[in-house]
Structures are given as C-alpha cells and as structure tokens.
Image (tube, coloured by chain):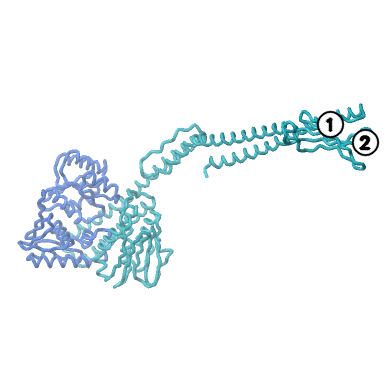
Amino acid sequence: MKILLIEDEQALRESISAYFTEEGSICETAADYASAIAKINLYQYDCVVLDLTLPGGDGMDILRKLKELNKKDGVLIISARHSLDDKLSGLNLGADDYLVKPFHLSELKARVAAIIRRKSFNGNNLILFHEISIDGLAMSTTVGQNAVNLTRKEYDLLIYFIANQNKVITKGALAEHIWGDEIDLSDHFDFIYTHIKNLRKKLMEAGCHDYIKSMYGVGYKFCAQ
Amino acid sequence: MKLAQQYNRANIFTSLMILLLSGGVYYFAIHYILTSKLDNDLNIEEQEIIGYAKRYNKLPFPGDFKNQKITYQLQKKGTAEERHYTSTRYFNNDQKHTEPGRSLITGVHVAGKDYIVNISKSSLESEDLFRLIFMITLGVLILLLLSLLLINRFVLSHLWSSFYEMLKQLKMFNVADNLELSAPPTQIDEFQELNQAVLAMAKRARQDYTELKNFTDNASHEMMTPLAVINSKLDTLIQTGALSDRQGELIADVYLAVSRISRLNQSLLLMAKIENNLIKDEENVELSELISQKINQFSELLQSNSIFVEQHLTRKELYINKYLADILLNNLISNAIRHNKLNGVITVQLSDTGLIISNTGLNKALDENRVFERFYKNASSEGSGLGLAISSQIAMLYRLQLKYGYDSGKHVFSIEF
C-alpha cells in the first residue's frame, strides 16, 4: 500500500513512517502544508494520514483540496485536538476516520488498513493471512476449510493482529482497541490475556498454526515464523 | 415590577392626591365665597328691615318672593336671640319642595317689642354652581388619569422599546455562536450609551472566548504532541527485537505512565472546557439505553470481580451533550466498580426524578465535603482523582446536583433531575 503521511513533528513522522514501511508498502512524508499540497496534486495514495495543525496552513484545507481534486484517497486525520467540532467537521468534509494523539502505532496501522480495505475491495472485503481467511462483510473466519466461530472481540483482535503482522503490539494498545479509551484497563490486562488465549485456542482447534507469540511481557506478536 | 409601572404608580398617586387636595380647597373656597355672598344678601335684607322699622316704627310684611322668605316672631320676655346665620331647609312654594337654604336670624326692636326676624334664602343656585364645579373637577381628574394611562401605554412603551429589544438580544447572547448583536435605533441618550456599552462588552467577551478556546486547543496540542512522540518511540523501540524480560517490564511501566499522563491531560482539558462552558451541541439523550450500554461495556470487569448489578431503569430523556453524558455515566459506573469489593453489588436506579448509583465497598463513609474535589482520592485508588470532580462539573453545567451519601455499607451517588 502507498501512504502519504502529513505531519510536522519530525520525531513522530520518523516513527510512523518506519512502522509503515515494509515489504510492499511505501510511506511518503510531507512536513508542511506546501509540500503536502504538491504531493497530493501529483500522486495517488491509498491513504493520507493527515495532521491538522501544520506550518503554513490548516490540515482541513488539504482535506478540502483532496475532495476538490476528486481524489479517491482515503483520509485519516490525526490530531491533538480532542474537539468534537474538529472531529465532526473533518468527517463531514470526507475524512474516513479520526484518531486523537497520542495513539499507538498499531492502532494507526489497523485504522489505515481498515480504510484501505473499505476503499479498495469493492464489496469483496477479504483479509488473508496464510491459511486464515476473513470475510469482512459477513464477519466470518475460516481456517483452510474449517469455519471458526469467533466472538466479536476475538474477531476484532484477529483483524488487529493481521493488520499489524510481524509487529510487537502492546497489551495497552490491544485493550484500548477492544474496549475503547474510556475504560481505563491499564491495571486489568488479564482480560486481554483471556481473549487471546481463547482466540488462539479456537484457531488452533480449526487447524491453524500458532501465530500469536507473547513478547517480553509487554505484548504480543502475530507472525508466521 | 417594571420601571414604567413603578413610575406610573408614583405619578398617578401624586396626581390623585394633588387633585383631591385641590378639589377640597376648591370646595371650601367656593363654599365660603358663595355662603358669604348669600350672607351678604341676607345682611342687606336685614338692613332694609331695620331701616323700614325705624322709619315707620313697624315691621314690613313678611314676604315670600324671589326665593326669599321673611318671618317674624315675638320674642319671649327674658330671652335674647343672638344674631346668627344658619343653614336650613327652604320650602319653595312655587315648586312645592324643599331646597337647601341659608337663614339669618336676628332681633329687631319695634314699638317697644322685641321680634325675632328670620330671613331665609334658597341656596339652590349656589348649590347648583357648586355641583357643577365639583363635576368639572371630577371630569378633569378622570381626563388626567386617562391621559396618563394613554401616555404610559403608547409613549412610554415606545420610548422603552429599544431597551427591551436590546434586553431580548442580551438574553439570547451566547459567546459561542456568531450572531452579532445589533443596536436598535433610539433617540434617547441613555439607551444609546447602553447599546454602545453592551456592544463593546459583547465584542470583548467574544474575543476572550476565542482566545480561551485557542489556548485550550494549543495547550492540548503542545502537551499531546510530545506524548505522542514518546508513545510512538516506545512502539518503535519494542520492534527492535531481542529485549530481555526485564527491559520489557521497564517499557511496560513507561507505557503505563504515558497513558496516565495523557489521560490526566485530557481530563484537565475537559474540565477547563466544561468550566468555560465551551461545550455545546446538547441533544435529547435517552439515559436508560446509555446506562445499559455502559454496564455492558464493563461486563468483563464486573464478571472478574463477581460484582452483581441490579438495574431499575425507566426511560428518561435529558437535554445534554451526549459526550458529556457518556463521561458522566462512565465515571460514576467505573467508580462503582473500581471501589467495590469482591462479590459486591451495584444498584443503578433511573426514574423520572433522578439517577441513583450505589455500590458496596469500603465500610467507611467518604468525606462528603471533599469527595468532589480535584485530586481527592483514597490512598488505595489508582484513578486520577479527577473523575468525580469532572462528573460534578458536568452535573453543575446542566443545573443538576450530584450528591454523595453513605448508607449502611453502601456508597450512594445521586443526581436529581
């Protein structure tokens, strides 16, 4: 996938682009308004990750410009402004999602992947990972030929893992993804453990390899090796 | 009471008093003048009788003409009739009825005899005159009252109209919207001055509001960005591989601290926003549904602590910002879980009159006066100490009151609608 990251904070830009750059993915960056406008004029992206406060202009104007140019790029707004007004006007202007800083890179990746999936698979929303196949519309999971009956939370976890395959995902990021950030579960990571244990058990019973690995007590990694 | 009304009252009261007083003065003055004119006439008549008696040494014939009667009466020996005027009844022979009259009773000495002379005159004419004057005064009085009322009704309300127009605009004034105040046209200096002062004040308030809003935004941005950097660097750090479990533990602690700071920061910003009334977009929010959702969200936490939730919910809509309603319920319910005990109970009661959330927990009441203070928390609590402060502020924003009480082992938080 091809992503444009528009973010003025250099440290954040580097982390995000490093996280997104992998085989088959390109993450281009723009640090200010002018270079962002230049890039969206020239190229087509699967998803534009857009910071709202930029030197030289307002991120909302970039969003407007994208719609003006009739671009099909998905747009994910990342903003430090936890303001409902901004969120609503961003979504009204045609942004696909809105993420408030600070966020986990894994959450950003999962959201970008979801946007791209919605945009590119016209009605045929399939997620594949080796023998696992997920139909995003029917919300059904199969391993090889065997259907796996997952709960909503296990299903969400699996998609999150596949979007962040080969990355270490922290328990905190997983908890926030599954329960939202309203519920402070920072001292209750056992729930994550329970859900992951169940997910792993169901997948393996259907004949799946064990892809979920616990990492240094911090989190988990979903990988084929 | 309206100013015009109050002013009118004073005005009408004084006018009435002055009119009544002048009416009284009129009455006495005219009465005095008319009576002395009659008395004067009677006096002339007396002089004529005395003159006649002196000249002819006899009394003139008692007469009854031109609304005047003269009668004589022999005075008894030893009594002396003092000369005096008196008001009497006068019998009108022509019209056969009695009228008010005025008499002069005096004594005259004729031919060695003392006579009492009674000269009476009808005072009907003067009474008529008097009545006329009274009617005119009354007429003037009514006319004056009527014109005062009319002036109040039309002139005063017209004069004050620009004031009321401004007042209406002020009542609708909201710093958060962009409706400009417009000064209603007026010729009155005071109102023009008022309009200018109000317009200037509104402009200043809007300016302050914008600055404050920008400050809130900027503060949030400035603090959240470094936090986002820390978080993303940690996320990157754990990808580098080959970390020991000890390092993992340390990183997990840093993650926790970062998440706590960002929560704290968000809470503080939210409080600032609520305090400054920066949150709008109220809508009718159905609470029972929201509460069920919340309890559902917490189901795992409830299960793991074997906490039983008793719900008595009736439908109740509240005109409130949905986001704030969510935070309010979230804080109250998560507190009820967090500060509960194993196998505890939470009771949620929602009715038309209020919401009551009670939970088992520490067998000791919290400090009722401090429980809603910022950063007030139990030594054992892991929360930020802002949850209840925020809840109480949200309640206050919508003129509800969040109260705490302790009742035989149960901590009760209630909101009355």
Q: Nearer the viewer, residue B417 or B330?
A: B417
Q: Which residue is mark 2?
A: B113
Residue B376: image quadrant is bottom left
Q: Which residue is mark 1?
A: B62
Q: Which residue is situated farthest in the right direction here? A: B112
What's the amino acid at mark 1? Pro
Q: Chain B: what color? A: cyan
Residue pictured at 13% horizontal, 54% vertical: A137
Image x and y of residue B222, in percent: 31, 50
Image x and y of residue B183, in percent: 43, 35
What chain does badge 2 belong to? Answer: B
Residue A112 relative to residue B207: left or right? left
Q: Nearer the viewer, residue A82 or B87?
A: B87
Q: Chain A: what color? A: blue
**Within 10 angstroms of label 1, few (less than 14), some, or many (20 or more) residues?**
few
The reply to whether residue A195 is in sight is yes
Image x and y of residue B354, in percent: 37, 60
As helix, strand or loop, the secondary structure at mark 1 comes to loop
Give the distance between the C-alpha atoms of the residues marked 1 and 2, in whole angstroms: 17 Å
**Within 10 angstroms of label 2, few (less than 14), some, or many (20 or more) residues?**
few
Q: Nearer the viewer, residue B80 or A220?
A: B80
What's the amino acid at mark 2? Lys
